[in-house]
Image: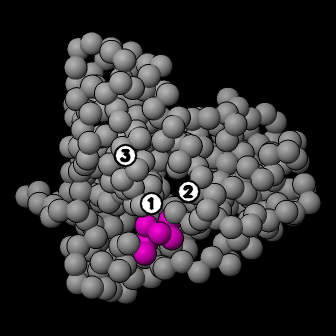
Amino acid sequence: MRRLPKPRGPLSSALVQTLGGTELCAASERLDLDAAFASTSDILHDDDLQLALFVLYELHYSGFGPISDLWEWNADLLRVRALIEERFENRILEAIGELPKPAPQAQSVAEALFAMVEDSDGPSVSSYVARHATMEQAREFLIHKSVYQLKEADPHTWAIPRLTGRAKSAMVEIQADEYGNGLPGHMHSELFARTMQGLGLESEFGAYIDVVPAITLASVNLMSLFGLQRRHRGAICGHLAIYEMTSSLPNAKYARGFRRLGFDSPITDYFDEHVEADAVHEQIAGRDLAGGLIEAEPGLADNVFLGAAAALAIDEMAGRWQLEAWKNGSSSLLSPVPVMA
């Protein structure tokens, strides 16, 4: 049974206490957002705010333990979430800069997305894992990724009922692969769970929420922000497109790094699967998903590229956090993690 995470400040503490109660009270009276906003210098790196937002989003996924499902649509919590999202969105807009303006044609959109990937100069966690990562750092890498990978595809799937035509067909094709094409044990989240187990880590979603930093939570909260809101249906498609376009080569490097450390199938199956699948997905995502959506709804172009640019920007920040810690000889997590026998 999934438990509520440990609070990281006054806001997340009040939220956890509220959710753990038995009365669906006026939650906004307990949650002091003004104080939380006043005390933060950067919401992307604010543990209290990012954890609170993560918890609020998880109410729309699998929830937590015995708390009432009625909290999912509690008006006060939705109001609190919207106020945090507004700050979160504004900070994202500050981080991404000018967006591309290609012609509203599928090929032009795909070319613009590929150009964004080429122009990205963020730190390469995959190259470090391939060549230098120790066993401890490889475990930390998996722990960071687990916050999304153990529920891989779910945030993007929210977009399916909000799309039509070519874009919807492309999204369904990509997501079907992510979910293992209906074969038990083949979902990408299940492959990742086996990788974690092979390195002596817990594989239940949320097991390591208490030790990942705010920027890791922010990278996952970004997907929920886009996926849960119809107004951002373009952004979640742009986010997925960039994810697919930046997946195949890095996963080949991750597989190489884990083999360097002495692992092979089934531990490397997750990475090997993505090398093959995402080489196909990147074309579908760029042309048919993002490009098809903009062809059908040209007014969503900025929103699509917002999602793509935000994915690149936040992932660069998260990668920089990890690499700076490792190169300084320290942990990239908030506290040590025991290895299972």
Quadrant for the N terminus in the image: top left
Q: Nearer the viewer, residue 38 or 308?
A: 38
List x then y, in percent, for residue 321.
38, 72
The reply to whether callout 2 and callout 1 are in contact (CB within 8 Å) is: yes
According to the picture, the residue beneath numbered tag 1 turns out to be 42
Quadrant for the C terminus in the image: bottom left
How far apart marks 2 and 1 lie (CA) works out to 8 Å
Residue found at x 30% / y 78%: 325
- Label 2: which secondary element: helix
How far apart marks 2 and 3 lie (CA) works out to 15 Å
Relative to 220, 159 lies left or right: right
How far apart marks 3 and 1 lie (CA) works out to 11 Å
The amino acid type, in three-letter code, at marker 3 is Ala
Residue found at x 39% / y 82%: 128
List x then y, in percent, for residue 2.
25, 34
State whether residue 162 appears in this view.
Answer: yes
List x then y, in percent, for residue 331.
23, 73
User: Which one is closest to the eye, mark 2 or mark 3?
Assistant: 3
According to the picture, the residue beneath numbered tag 3 turns out to be 36
Residue at the left extreme of this rendering = 341
Q: Quadrant of residue 77?
A: top left
- Label 1: which secondary element: loop
Relative to 197, 273 lies left or right: right
Which label number is shown at residue 91?
Answer: 2
Disc 3 crowd, CA 10 A, few/some/many (<14, 14-19, 20+): some
Is 79 covered by the magenta stretch?
no
The mark total stands at 3
- Label 3: which secondary element: helix
